[in-house]
Amino acid sequence: MNKKTVRDIDVKGKRVLVRCDFNVPQDEEGNITDNRRIVSSLPTIKYLIENGAKVILCSHLGRPKGEVKKEFSLAPVAKELSKQLNIEVKLADDIIGESAKKLVSEMKDGEVVLLENVRFDAREEKNDPEFAKQLASLAEIYVNDAFGTSHRAHASTAGVADYLPAVSGFLIEKELDFMGNALENPARPFVAILGGKKVSDKIGVINALLEKVDTLIIGGAMAYTFFKAQGYGVGDSICELDKLDLALELLEKAKQKGVKLMLPVDTKVGKAPEKDTESKIVKCTEIPDGWEGFDIGPETIEIYKKELKDAKTIVWNGPLGLFEIDQFAIGTNEIAKALAESDAVTIIGGGDSAAAIEKAGLSDKMTHISTGGGASLEFLEGKKLPGIECLENK
């Protein structure tokens, strides 16, 4: 994971292609409603500007599926970047066509051009070598700073590195530093918290973490598969009936490895996944028919908080309940507060976990919040990420 960064190369006067993650949410009028991904890309962009590079930015937005669609244009991103950088960021009308080539050829040192949505060309997601080659021909150096898409071998995340010297930006450097160190050399006790809906989504991560952690805390809907596997009724709770044997195997593996695997002891159940639904607290082993588990209960919250008190490294991926609905967000919020008050290194693995922390207003209290949902999961699993593998080693 010891990859070269923009600091390790001379960028002055060079055309530098930077893959960013500008996949930002917008309202119906095309106004950006959350600019965090744009803001998190600024340190790398500013560094390149200050060091005299000609900065060519590229990103995807949404899923246009290889077609030019106005609602997926990066025009609002160019506008927001111009505001954030306090300089004009010119938007090309295309990716590798006449507009892009003209704007790039006219660039002066320290200027910034944004290419149009790379997914407007179907060859991007196919990692087409010819498309990657033409994209690379716009520049002399490639910088990947889009951790959230680094688990995809696309033309702009991996393919261009076949034709250009390739290094990481500061965002990817930060991800590798925090997440890499947490996995390779964690301060102990090392506790992982895993939530979310399905055990099947997290099999690889659970297996990988059982090799590394001291304690594995389970929450979210996937806990009910573990209870069903042990012969308990789970009412109408989400449960993967085809994963019951696997759940038992994971419990056995934890025992063999000497890892404390913690499951909820009580749960908040409701009649339906709706905000005004009737709800009550029951033991996890006594969920009645017609009720569905939507959150960890108060006793579980206290047990989990006690376990987290002495932790030195905490990695969290996946909410512990239906956090989008306030009455079922208590478990997730309480554990988030426990992390915020902890002296441990706290790493949040992107996606819904990051959204839950943001909703709780505790983002600034965490050591690191990953910018990649799927990418951070695959990283935790120990998989090789194509967008990282293609970068030069130090």
Image: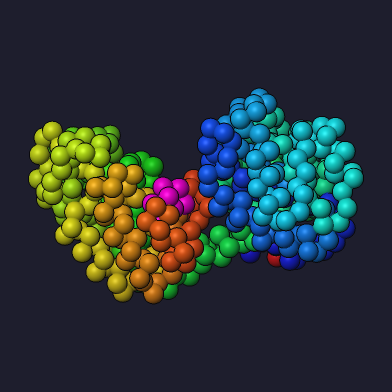
Q: Residue at x 83, y 34 (%)?
A: 99
Dividing the picture into quadrants, the one containing residue 137 is: top right
Question: Magenta: predominant secondary structure element?
Answer: helix
Q: Looking at the image, can residue 285 be seen?
A: no
Verify whether residue 258 appears in magenta.
no
State left or right for residue 87 relative to residue 124. Answer: right
Q: Looking at the image, can residue 20 be seen?
A: yes
> Measured from the top left, where is residue 287 in percent x and y?
12, 42
Q: Above or below — where is 2 with respect to 108? A: below
Dividing the picture into quadrants, the one containing residue 201 is: top left
Q: Residue at x 62, y 32 (%)?
A: 72
Q: Residue at x 38, y 46 (%)?
A: 202
Residue closest to the eye, 266 or 76: 76
Q: Which residues are magenta?
A: 350-357
> Measured from the top left, where is residue 394 in percent x and y?
70, 65
State left or right for residue 73 relative to residue 273. Answer: right
> Measured from the top left, where is residue 290 in percent x and y?
13, 33
State left or right for residue 3 relative to residue 355. Answer: right
Verify whether residue 355 appears in magenta.
yes
Quarter the N terminus occupies: bottom right
Q: Residue at x 21, y 39 (%)?
A: 276
Dividing the picture into quadrants, the one containing residue 301 is: bottom left
